[in-house]
Amino acid sequence: MSVKSFRRKPINLSQEKLIKTDFFKSEQRLPLLVEPLVDGIDLAVWATSNLEWIETQILNYGGVLFRNFNINKVNGFEHFIKIISEKLIEYSYRSTPRSQVSGKIYTSTEYPAEQSIPLHNEMAYSRNWPMKIWFCCVEAAEKGGATPIADSRKVFQRINPKIKEKFIEKKIMYVRNYGQGLDLQWENAFQTTDKSFVTSYCRDAGIEFEWRDGNDLRTCQVCQVVAAHPKTGEMVWFNQAHLFHISSLKAEVRESLLTMIQEEDLPRNALYGDGSKIENSVIEEIKEIYQQEAILFPWKEGDILMLDNMLTCHGRQPFAGKRKVVVGMAEPFCA
């Protein structure tokens, strides 16, 4: 992955007096680094008196990293989120495996350590998503394991106009086949064993669905490619075509699967909204832009990264050793 290196450069002393703000690199204004000026500052208490300031920064920069504050890594993390956004949301209609840690705090995606997770906006494969997402580093990896981030406004601006126009015209269709032991079971994705609940959820969300062979499920939904931020009005590239597309599978895995099942039966795929195939070259071009815009910083135990989920995308690098990063989401938005 091509990433831009970081170098700490102080920029100013905040008017809040108890904190200071820096950028890791002067020409990169993401994330804004916020640190206490004195030891022992309780982040939750400080946040209670500075909610407007925090909201201004997150809308301006897209991401804020709180470092070296006095906070309990799980319970305090959840409390901090509630101060800013009142209620956390459950991670339903999942696309990746996670575990509940406490309340509505979850593990980050539980993919094998040697795998990377491409940059993406959380739940951009849906018409409903959280406006804010937080990450807390409980234990930093011995090696690697960074969470790359990128400005979704810049990604939007860099997409080839012809590619952008075609996607905007046709939108994106996400096809998912649950079961077969190849990906998430629908019980995991929807967090229920009740078929009637899944049926109601799909109908309410505008998801086409088909129960197959008794207990297998296929869903299909046409969603947005780009979106305007409801508060700033800025346009962002907001989809997961590059994650769902057949080309995201390793060649040997893809070829092996296609000897056993038809392409339409793959665990997941992304098509144009009219059902036609998205060209591999288009997906590769989009992936390259994400890689070029990726910004990397090393996790430090106790770090809290707060992102505006529309303005900023995130991913994960491979790692060695133990790593524990927990996640909370809030402020549901319906397109």
Image (spheres, grey):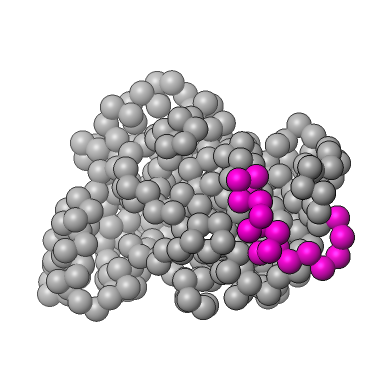
Q: Nearer the viewer, residue 283 or 23?
A: 23
Taking the image as drawn, is residue 2 in sight? no
In reply to whether residue 40 is colored magenta, the answer given is: yes
Compared to residue 164, the image places residue 187 above or below, namely below
- Dividing the picture into quadrants, the one containing residue 6 is top right
Q: Position of residue 205 (x, y in %)?
A: 23, 53
- Dividing the picture into quadrants, the one containing residue 27 is top right
Outermost residue on the top side: it is: 161
> In the rendered structure, which segment of residues is drawn in magenta?
37-54
Taking the image as drawn, is residue 311 in sight? yes
In reply to whether residue 88 is colored magenta, the answer given is: no
Residue at position x 63%, y 72% from top?
76
Q: Please give left or right for residue 301 compared with residue 309 in the image.
A: right
Compared to residue 43, the image places residue 72 above or below, namely below
Q: Position of residue 153 (x, y in %)?
A: 53, 32
Residue at position x 21%, y 36% from top?
274
Number of numbered tags placed on the structure image: 0
Q: Please give left or right for residue 195 compared with residue 14 in the image.
A: left
Q: Position of residue 326 (x, y in %)?
A: 58, 68
Q: Position of residue 206 (x, y in %)?
A: 20, 50
Residue at position x 84%, y 42% from top?
13
